[in-house]
Amino acid sequence: MNPIEADLSESQLAELKASSLFNDDLAPVPEARRKWRVGSFAALWVSMSACIPTYMLASSLIGGGMNWWEAILTIFLGNLIVLLPMVLNAHAGTKYGIPFPVYCRAAFGTLGANLPALLRALVACGWFGIQCWIGGNAIYKILGVFLPSLLGGTPLPVLDITLAQFFCFLFFWGINLWVIYLGIDCIRWLLNIKAPLLIALGLALLWWAYRHAGGFGPILSQPSAFDAGQPKAGQFWKFFFPALTGMIGFWATLSLNIPDFSRYAKSQRDQVLGQALGLPATMALYSFIGVAVTSATTIIYGTTIWDPVDVLTRFTNPAVLVVAMVALCIATLATNIAANVVSPANDFSHLAPRRISFRMGGYITGIIGVLIMPWKLVADPNGYIFVWLIAYSALLGPIGGILIADYFVWRRRKLNLVALYQAAGEYRFTNGFSVVAIVALVVAVLPSLPGFLEEVKLLKPDAVPKTLSELYHYAWFVGFAVAFVVYLVGRKLTVASVRQTA
């Protein structure tokens, strides 16, 4: 039996367990535990895609000037594009049963794998904080119905939110840490009830928008701000490509660490078909709800409200508001644990497998999620897309390019499973680091750096040529392509150099 594609022998398993690079959470999943079929992956994506950030993603495009079909098309295209690296990176997880940080060892080295793992983990910490802020804000609004005085107050220095908002955020954050403590069974239970709750809430909001805006006609007839005679006439493409990059960036995180889930797949067909059925369709459907409701707020209130929590606070019936907010909190909790704890917990565990468990990794994620002050990341639609989503896609795109180039082109889908856990094995490279991968990552990030510095006001708009700064708006595409090419060239040069020396 080939140990690469089947269970490890007892002697191999004993060797792995003696390694400093091994713990039970990072171990290859044996064949008997690989039970996820098409339905499991489709349900996973339905559950993770039906969330408030998806709603906000769509409504932020409306806030940026798009009409309903432009926004939905942009989101659908973005998810169709990101589905490709998602399915490709999932292949190694399914074939070898390994999680994301172990998968990274083949390209980055046994120690160098910590670099992409930590970059991915820090992004997840940001998303963890954003989801905690959404849930905490819902609690804050619920309390405000019964104690209106809470909704006032002066923002705290540095934090820029009130004391009541901060305590509500910490309360919901604490619930998340409690679920992490309870373990995977509690997470699975939450996911089972979460998707129906949030889909029901979304459809209820859609019905409300339909009723109060006079049907879908007025909602869907809202003009694009980029049309002739409108405020942003002729600027569509200038907004579209950065927005598309942002849409890809939304799931660029999971497109890397998908092996954390695909390692439980029964077959490659199950993970490919399940993801193809679950991701683009659910994102399009829930995005349509966000688009329709946001467009309706423009008709009903005369202003665009892109945050669903703010929309819900306009309801006058306290019972309706409380039920909706509780459903939102439960659904947000489930999404947060599944999408933003599983991966960083594994990633932080990878730093010191003998000392950091999955649970401890989850606690580290929670602490960083507070320190990052997530409420500032989602303060406005422009910052949400152009700073948060695009900025981290500039980091994750190159990592995806390197992993796919290494696994599919350089190694032709063949890994030495035992060596992935050996500190002195073939994936040690130079003292545990792959110089080729690190150089490729740095080179691929550099083109997007000037534009990012301009976006966060650290460079003046005319400090660098416009053509160079504009590359930031295509950060994921540029980073992926440059890293893919530089990595393969670097590998070939390294082999040629070794042959000459020999």
Image (cartoon, grey):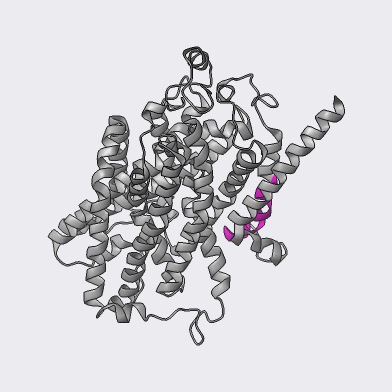
**Is residue 277 shown to the viewer in this render?**
yes
Name, please, the residue furthest toward the front: 1
Residue name at image x 61 percent, y 41 percent: 408
| Front one among 292 and 261 | 261
**Is residue 147 shown to the viewer in this render?**
no
Q: Position of residue 274 (x, y in %)?
A: 40, 48
Residue name at image x 51 percent, y 53 percent: 82
Please say if 92 is above or below 443. Answer: above
Residue 4 is covered by the magenta coloring = no
Indicate the quadrant containing the C terminus: top left, top right, bottom left or bottom right.
top right
Please say if 175 is above or below 212. Answer: above
| Front one among 72 and 214 | 72
Residue name at image x 37 percent, y 81 percent: 221
Residue name at image x 22 percent, y 69 percent: 207
The magenta segment is 443-458
Relative placement, left or right, of 204 versus 489 is left
Relative placement, left or right, of 477 versus 275 is right
Q: Position of residue 208 (x, y in %)?
A: 22, 70
| Front one among 12 and 118 | 12
Q: Position of residue 482 (x, y in %)?
A: 68, 50
Secondary structure mostly taken by the magenta-highlighted segment of the chain: helix
Q: Position of residue 191 (x, y in %)?
A: 28, 43
